[in-house]
Structure formats: structure tokens, C-alpha cells
Image: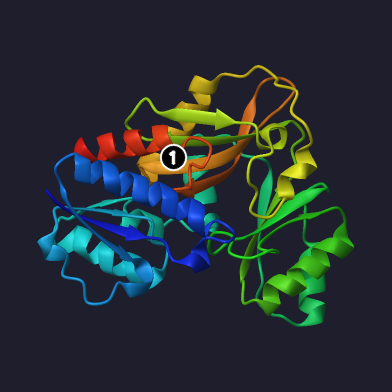
Amino acid sequence: MNVLGISRSPRFSPNSVDRDMAIFTAVASRMQRGGNDVSIISEDLFIAVDLSEFDLVFSMARGRDVLTALAEAEQQLNLRVVNSAHGLLQANRAQLVTTLKDTAVPQPKLQILNIESSEEHSLQELSEELILTYPLWLKRGDACAQRPGDVCFVSNQSELHQALISYAANGVHAVIAEEHVPGDLVKFYGVEGSDFFFITYPTETNNFSKFGLEQHNGKPLHTPFDANMLKSAADRAAKSIGCIVYGGDAIISADGKFVVIDFNDWPSFSACRKEAAKAIANRLKNLD
């Protein structure tokens, strides 16, 4: 099978370039050892690639130009792309809120704030429209976090206003406001359509953190919860998007219930890279 692997651009890997490349390389290696003819390219160099030469593409790309080209190949050439480029184009953070709701994935209380103007009075009015309870989290709604400030923790209206000024200055027009939920923070990693599902407690294990924001949830209490239910919820969301290779974050409350606070396409799997690479390669060889 002729396979193309597309690695992620450094601009979409804040503080994670080596980690993202490590899982990409591990999957490519396993695909090669499985007897496939594997070509690899960075999304930054993805120019005039003849996709008709390939039977399968596994891609960590996040740039809209590359995703658009891959989505066209999915439609016109019936090319299998993992993760689905068409799905990712339809799943920015703001749209993901709706997807999680439609697939019955528990989420915190949230509100989407649309920045229509960068003028001071407009941003002040927007901050006054908030109906959620502080403290809360703000996340850019158009894309994954790429720089400090794309995700931030705010405790009052003044901090919210300053954050909105920063978002507006960086050209972000939609911001997701999400109530902070106390409890155990867990990171989960999965491969939809397989048994692979890995959970870790980042504030306990001192795992790598892109921006150091996990500290707001403190040390975990290891409240018992149903990990199978979390996997089932995450798999539903992944299948809906076409995001076979995924990761995310959830909060386990004192009553054992969970809410999903983040969901990402193809994370670095740094806490479980070897097991994840095996699961991903096996899934690529056994697509539906």
C-alpha cells in the first residue's frame, strides 16, 4: 500500500515540536515495517503533491490550505485520510462545542463570545454580557491554541476585559468562555475503533505542559469514575468528526461524574507513545 505521512508544522506545535515529531515518526516506522511504501513530508512543504499516487494518508497537518487539499482528495479521489481533513475543517473549537453536545458528551457550562469590534467600548459591553460564574476559562474559538494567551484563566470581569482586548488584537473573533469545574484533571488519549485508551493525571505526574495552566486544578484526589464511559463519549465525538486519532482533557468531579473540557486531533501521546503508535498503525491497516 502506498502511504503518505504529513507531519505537523512547528507553528501548530507550541513547545511540542519534538514530541509531535516523535509520534509521527513512530507511526511511520511501524507502517514501513508492516510492508507499506511510506513517503513523508512536512505540511510546510506540501506543495503540488499528487495525491492520486497514494492509497492512504495519515496526517497531523492543521493548516487550512493543506486540509483543504486533503479534503478535496477525500471527496474527488475517495482517498482515505486520517484524521479526516473534511472533518477537521468543520471542527474548530466553536463548532466542536456543538459536536460534543450533539453526541451527548458532557461539557461544562459555556458561552461563545463573538468579538465584532476591537473598540474599547464594544469589548467592555461584551464582557458585561457574560452570564457564567467566575472563575472561568477562555479559549480562542477559531483554532487550537498556538501561543500563550490563546487559553487563559480569568477570575473577574476586569481580567475578562483585558483578555478580550488581547484576543481582538490577535485577530480572534470568537472566544469560548467556560466555567471552571473543580475536580481531578485527567488527560485522555484514544484511537477510535480500537481498544486503546490511556488516561493520565498531569498535575500528579509532572507531565509536560504546553502553557502550565493545569496548576489551577491542583493535585488530584483520584476520585473514582467510569473510564469506559469516558472512552465511549470520546469515541462518539471522534467518530462524528472523523478524528480517529485523538486526545483531550476532562474533569472528574467529587461525585465521579466527568465533563470534557478539551478535545484535540492527533496529540503527541508523549505519556504513552509506544503503545499509541502501535494502536494507530494497526487502526490504519484496518480502516472500515
Tell me residue 152's x, y (percent). 73, 57
Residue 288 shows up from this direction: no
Circle 1 Cα neighbour tier, 10 Å, few/some/many (<14 / 14–19 / ≥20): many
Amino acid type, mark 1: Ala
Q: Is residue 96 left or right of residue 210?
A: left
Name which quarter of the figure residue 257 lies in.
top right
Residue for point 77% across, 34% down: 182
Q: Please name the colour scheme applied to the rendered image.
A: rainbow
Q: List x then y, in percent, for residue 24.
A: 37, 51
**Which structural element holds mark 1?**
helix
- Across and down, in percent, residue 17 comes to 51, 59
Quadrant location of the C terminus in the rendered image: top left
Residue positioned most to the bottom: 119
Quarter of the image holding residue 176? Answer: bottom right
Q: Is residue 16 above or below residue 206?
A: below
Residue at 73% x, 52% y: name it: 137
Residue 12 located left or right of residue 235: right
Occupied quadrant, residue 79: bottom left
Which is nearer the eye, 164 or 228? 228
> Does 120 sit left or right of 280 as displayed?
right
Give the x, y percent position of residue 189: 48, 36
Residue at screen point 77% across, 66% down: 163
In the image, residue 143 sits, relative to residue 173, either above or below, namely: above
> Where is 106 relative to 171, above or below?
above
Left or right of residue 192: residue 168: right
Residue at the image position 35 percent from the left and 45 percent from the top:
26
Q: Which residue is mark 1?
A: 237
Q: Can residue 176 be seen in this snapshot?
A: yes
